[in-house]
Image (cartoon, helix red, strand yellow):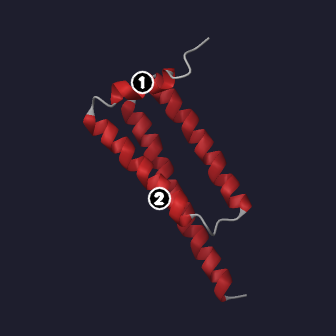
Amino acid sequence: MDDPFEWAKKFDEWSKDKKDSKEIVKIMQAIHLLMDGCSHNLNTAQLTKVQKRMKTTIKQCIFWRDQNNRKRFIYDLRQFGIWLADFISDTEEEYWENENNP
């Protein structure tokens, strides 16, 4: 049986490189901020879309972690964050347009 914490070992190795680990933490904090502070007006279908995109990103990041490709891992994580910010911004704009024009 595989070690259930094996996935974390690669991240522990990466944490020795302060630049990469700081970048990953910074991106994750931004994603967390977007999800916790800006997603309250998303409907169920929109949240489902975010969930699907997030699952895909997690699979991609696991793949790049296994390949020990930090640059691509960070790139995919950053791209998800950018997509999420744009998606939330677009849906917020739509929400407020609908609120002001019932």
The residue at which mark 1 appears reads as: 10
* Residue 68 in view in this figure: no
Horizontal and vertical percent position of residue 70: 38, 31
Quadrant containing the C terminus in the rendered view: bottom right
As helix, strand or loop, the secondary structure at mark 2 comes to helix
- The residues tagged by marks 2 and 1 sit, at their Cα atoms, a distance apart of 25 Å
Tell me which residue sits at (62%, 41%) in the image. Answer: 55
Horizontal and vertical percent position of residue 43: 70, 65
> What is the quadrant of residue 21 in the picture?
top left
User: Pointer 1: residues within 10 angstroms few (<14), some, or many (20+)?
Assistant: few
Tell me which residue sits at (49%, 53%) in the image. Answer: 32
Q: What amino acid is at disc 1?
A: Lys
Quick one: which residue is furthest to the top in this view?
A: 1
Horizontal and vertical percent position of residue 6: 50, 20
In this orientation, which residue lies closer to the viewer: 16 or 71? 16
* Residue 20 in view in this figure: yes
Q: What amino acid is at disc 2?
A: Leu
The first of marks 2 and 1 along the sequence is 1
Horizontal and vertical percent position of residue 25: 38, 44
User: Pointer 2: residues within 10 angstroms few (<14), some, or many (20+)?
Assistant: few
Compared across the picture, whether 44 is left or right of 2 comes to right
